Amino acid sequence: MQSLEDLKKIASQIRRDIVRMVTIAGSGHPGGSLGCTDFLTTLFFKVMNQDPARWTRDGKGQDVFILSAGHLAPVYYSLLARKGYFPVSELGSLRKYGSRLQGHPSIRKGLPGITQASGSLGQGLSVAIGIALAKKLDKDPHTVYVMCGDGECQEGQIWEAGIFGAHHQADNLIAMTDWNGQQIDGPTSEVSGLGDLEAKWKAFGWEVVVADGHDYAQISEAFDQAGAKKGRGKPIMILFKTDMGHGVDFMAGTHKWHGKAPSEEQCKEALKQLEETLGDF
């Protein structure tokens, strides 16, 4: 099991991957990818029971992860490559014609680790609940994880899924929301305010855990708490409070880097702030 210090080092390399991938591609979504790196690194390298060597898209006998906020593909691809699902060298092909690393996760070319195509916001939670209920029917004790964005929670389908998951007691599901308060058009509070997400998910019949998405001790504790709540008749939502663009000072705390690629000079400046720990692709 990885220590908290090990996780921080892996996360630093993943952030380097994100910045370099998007710069090389000339397009992509670095802000949110950087913001959710810490808790997703903890999930992939400490918490989730998933073996790249045995991975199959049907998810049988392993935990399953769905990235509902599919535009955050850069962080997802880096996590998968660094975990051993496909060669790290392939990260340089992000968004290139014919690449397996499309702008949103795709199953068309069979990229290992991708259970479901995503990116049409609001749909991933519904898919994850379906998988969770299938696992219960199969008496498969493993967990289904799904990550949503807070801007994505303006989609009605998120709340339809919330009602459905609670009604059908999908208590083997652990959902996460990247609660950074930003979306492509500006702060969520100005575009279409979300109000108190903790109170809303509780009102919808979910167990809720709230944590700082950049504090590794809190992140680990949040996953422990969520795991302890499994099997009690309610799905679980972890609300991770994060800072969009975290790790790169000129990208942090603003929506302006939601879907914007850095220039070569900006990329160099960002990389100066991020330690290379596993070797660049």
Image: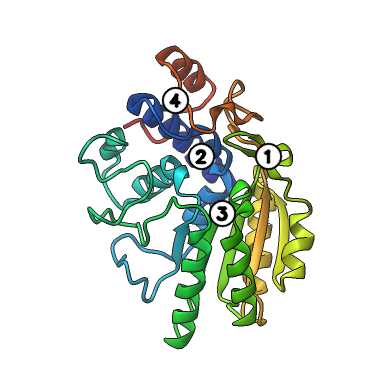
**Residue 80 in picture, x, y percent from top left:** 37, 50
Q: What is the quadrant of residue 71 in the picture?
A: top left
Q: Which residue is mark 1?
A: 191
Q: Which residue is mark 3?
A: 148
CA gap between label 3 and label 4 equals: 22 Å
Please state the total of marks drawn on the protein image.
4
Q: Say if mark 3 contacts mark 1, CB within 8 Å.
A: no
Q: Secondary structure at mark 4?
A: loop
Q: Say if mark 1 contacts mark 4, CB within 8 Å.
A: no
The residue at 66%/50% (across/down) is 240
CA gap between label 2 and label 4 equals: 12 Å
Q: Which mark is residue 261?
A: 4
Q: Select label 3 or label 1 by which is in front.
A: 1
Question: Can residue 47 be seen?
Answer: no
Q: Which residue is mark 2?
A: 33
The residue at 23%/41% (across/down) is 99
**Residue 205 in picture, x, y percent from top left:** 72, 74
